[in-house]
Image (tube, rainbow, N blue to C red):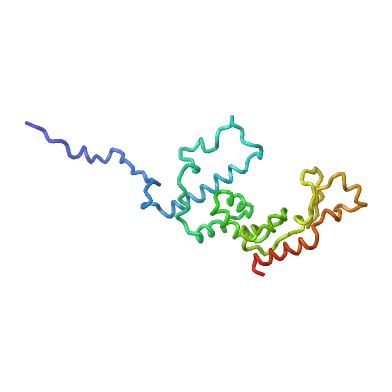
Amino acid sequence: MSSSPDKNSIFDPSKPKKKRHWSWSDPDRVDPHEALKHVMLKMRLHSLSNSGSTTPHSESEPDSDSFSPNPVSTAPDFTAMLSDELLLNVFNRIPDAKQLFSNSLVCKRWCVLCGKLIPSIKLLDWEFLESGRLSYRFPNLVDINIVPASIMFERNSGILLSTKSLEVYLNSGVLETEGSFVRKEDILDSEAIDKGVRILAEGVGI
């Protein structure tokens, strides 16, 4: 007499159920909430990678992504599925404004979006203003300090004179300025400053 297989053994509730793993590889099944989590993870990992030492990376040191089973750098960028408005909303909720500068280094799109959320900067390079890149990089500026960029001084000096509105690097040449910390020839001429102000006014729509 042949014995039929036990049906209960197939549907045994005591056996652990196999979980069906959700994969990023299927674009039709991407969850918007998971995509948003991916944005925050990418921001956090990028922040951690820039919070360490500023010395060049040593070849003997392992990459930070080597400990991750799914490194973000090699994974597809699913943040591209999110609209600019949603990403701006995420970036705008970051409490530390300095984090925007770190996030802007992730990719070109993040650079443009984060630049829209920065209202004030201190300009250090006058050529950055004359090239027109300042208005493109930061289109919503309302407060721009151009004084540091209008003074030409050696930035590799180890002496820094700092006030509320101005920082000047000093060298041995300050002894020849008759008590002044900035020489007249180190200041941009009025024509160059007027040209830069006009470019700035046109860029911000004044």
Q: Is residue 96 above or below residue 14?
A: below
Q: As drawn, is 56 to the left or to the right of 162? A: left
Q: Which of 15 and 51 is in front in this view?
A: 51
Q: In this view, does 142 lie above or below 105?
A: below
Q: Residue furthest bottom?
A: 206
Query: What is the x, y in percent for residue 58?
Result: 61, 33
State the residue at coordinates (11%, 33%).
Answer: 3
Query: What is the x, y in percent for residue 91?
Result: 56, 56
Query: What is the x, y in percent for residue 105?
Result: 58, 49
State the residue at coordinates (59%, 31%).
Answer: 59
Q: Residue furthest left?
A: 1
State the residue at coordinates (60%, 57%).
Answer: 115
Q: Examine the image and state in which quarter residue 200 appears.
A: bottom right
Total count of labels = 0
Q: Examine the image and state in which quarter residue 81 appears.
A: bottom left
Query: What is the x, y in percent for residue 64?
Result: 55, 37
State the residue at coordinates (21%, 37%).
Answer: 9
